Structure formats: structure tokens, C-alpha cells
Amino acid sequence: MKIFVKFFASAREAVGSDNVQVAVKEGATANDVLELFGSQFETMNRLRPYVRVAVNQSYVVNDHVLHEGDEVAIIPPVSGG
């Protein structure tokens, strides 16, 4: 199934893109998406313990099951002042 993944802040810098469309297996979870990009990009792997995942604009836990066409956002912590 195909999903859309959006990257923000340092996650965007880590993968070099704002968003991508990827194919994942049926029953894939938010954690599976983190593992996929963590295995491809070392910086994303280091960010994994700190990022939040949102699916269709709502924060989810990492074992949230994804569905065809879902929009997954990977959001690292940000600071500002």
C-alpha cells in the first residue's frame, strides 16, 4: 500500500526531502516507517527516540496501524525563543 510521508525540521534535513510517497506492507505501523527511514539515513536513526509521529494530522503512538493513502508526518523536537 502507498502512504505519504512528510518530514519536518531536522528530519527533513536528514532525508533531504520535504515529503515522499512510499510503499509499505499491509498492516505496517508508524514504527515501521521510522525503521524504514532510520535504516536508510543514519541521522534519522539517531532522531528516532525523539520524534513524534502524526497520521492524518493527529499524533499517534508508534504501534498505530497505517492504511492506504495515510499521510504520516515525522516531527522532531524543535526549540525556539
Image (cartoon, rainbow, N blue to C red):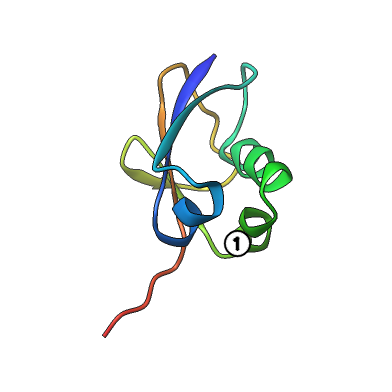
Point 39% across, 71% down: residue: 78
- Looking at the picture, tell me which residue is in the foreground, 7 or 14: 14
- Residue occupying the far bottom of the picture: 81
In screen coordinates, is 13 left or right of 8?
right
- Residue 5 higher or lower than 11, as above or below: above
In screen coordinates, is 11 left or right of 63?
left
Image-quadrant location for residue 70: top left
- Residue 52 higher or lower than 78, as above or below: above
Query: Does the rendering let one see residue 35?
Result: yes
* Quadrant where the image shows the C terminus: bottom left
Count neighbours of disc 1 (C-alpha within 10 A) and say few if under 14, some if 14 to 19, many if 20 or more: some
* Quadrant where the image shows the N terminus: top right
Point 50% across, 17% down: residue: 2
Provide residue 11's location: percent of width, then percent of height: 49, 55
- Residue occupying the far right of the picture: 39
In screen coordinates, is 18 left or right of 25?
left
Point 70% across, 55% down: residue: 42
In screen coordinates, is 36 left or right of 51?
right
Q: Which residue is mark 1?
A: 47
- Residue 44 higher or lower than 40, as above or below: below
- Residue occupying the far front of the picture: 16
